[in-house]
Image: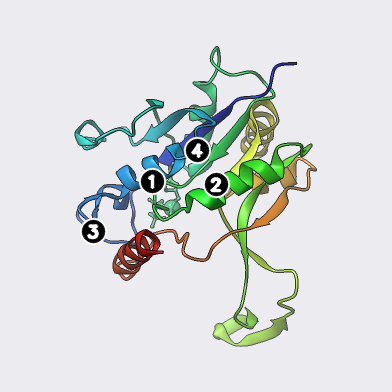
Amino acid sequence: MDTPHYWGVIPAAGQGTRMGAQRPKQYLELAGRRVLEHTLERLAADPRIAGIVVALGPDDAEWRHLTMPAGVEVWTVTGGAERCHSVLNALESLDGRAAPTDWVLVHDAARPCLRPADLSRLLDVLAGDPVGGLLALPVRDTMKRAGAGDRIDATVDRDGLWHALTPQMFRLQALREALDKAIAADVLVTDEAAAMEWAGHRPRLVAGAGDNLKITRPEDLPLAEYYLARQLRD
Ligand code: CTP
Ligand code: MG
């Protein structure tokens, strides 16, 4: 069998409700460029990425103004109601370009601070893995489970708890089947790993840097700007 290719998938069809800005957060300005321009460049940074498909909202008016990263083909599809639908539409567009066993790396549009070294390490660590996995970060705060009236029911053991980051890297056909089945069963999966878990797989956690934040609320934008500036200094 030929060596599998690696494809990037960026779901960028969200509205950014929690951000509360005038435009979806992937189009906000960050260090002189759009958030999504940074994200595309970070995912294109590894030369093993053969192409990147981006899922856009149906009324997207901003995409055409972006500058594309050099050296990689980028194309778009229309996203869906939830992130999982957007990702599935993107995977379908790989038909004819990709082999069933090729790797896909799904990376949030709102994570512009992915370190190129973390991306490369994810590819290296998972290259021979039967399932795939994701960048993740061990939690550091003490974790509480809330009950009625926002009162604590229990303290949850922090040992073994991780934050799921992206990219999340799985084989094209396996991920497509897992997402298909989860959606058909009306199980709302909030990341690709959850779909794979639901299908009976056990994705691998690969420790990544904590500055790979997902821009979610207004205070995250200056933080991302700081992280980008610090990464360039280091
Ligand atoms: N996303 C998508 N299609 C959707 C919903 C989300 O492609 N139907 C994408 C977002 O654009 C984002 C990523 O999935 O890049 C992670 O989602 P999230 O951080 O929740 O972004 P939004 O849904 O845009 O934000 P919010 O939940 O605050 O509205
Ligand atoms: Mg959302």
**Residue on which disc 4 sits:** 46
The residue located at (34%, 54%) in the rendering is 16
Q: CA distance from mark 4 to mark 2?
A: 7 Å
Q: Is residue 157 above or below residue 110?
A: below
- The picture places residue 155, in percent across and down from the top left corner, at 70, 84
> As drawn, is 129 to the left or to the right of 211?
right
In front here: 35 or 227?
227
Q: Earlier in the sequence, mark 1 or mark 3?
A: 3
In front here: 6 or 47?
47
- The picture places residue 172, in percent across and down from the top left corner, at 64, 28
Tally the numbered discs: 4
Q: Earlier in the sequence, mark 4 or mark 2?
A: 4
Disc 4 residue type (three-letter): Asp
Disc 1 residue type (three-letter): Thr
Q: CA distance from mark 1 to mark 2?
A: 12 Å
Question: Would you call the spot at circle 1 few (<14 residues within 10 Å), some (14-19), or many (20 or more)?
Answer: many
> As drawn, is 177 to the left or to the right of 14?
right
Q: Is residue 100 above or below residue 177?
A: above
Disc 3 + disc 2, Cβ < 8 Å:
no
Disc 1 + disc 4, Cβ < 8 Å:
no
Disc 3 residue type (three-letter): Ala
In front here: 199 or 94?
94
Q: Which mark, residue 21? A: 3
**Residue on which disc 1 sits:** 39
Q: CA distance from mark 4 to mark 3?
A: 31 Å
**Residue on which disc 2 sits:** 119
Q: Please identify the quarter of the rendering in which residue 131 is found.
A: top right
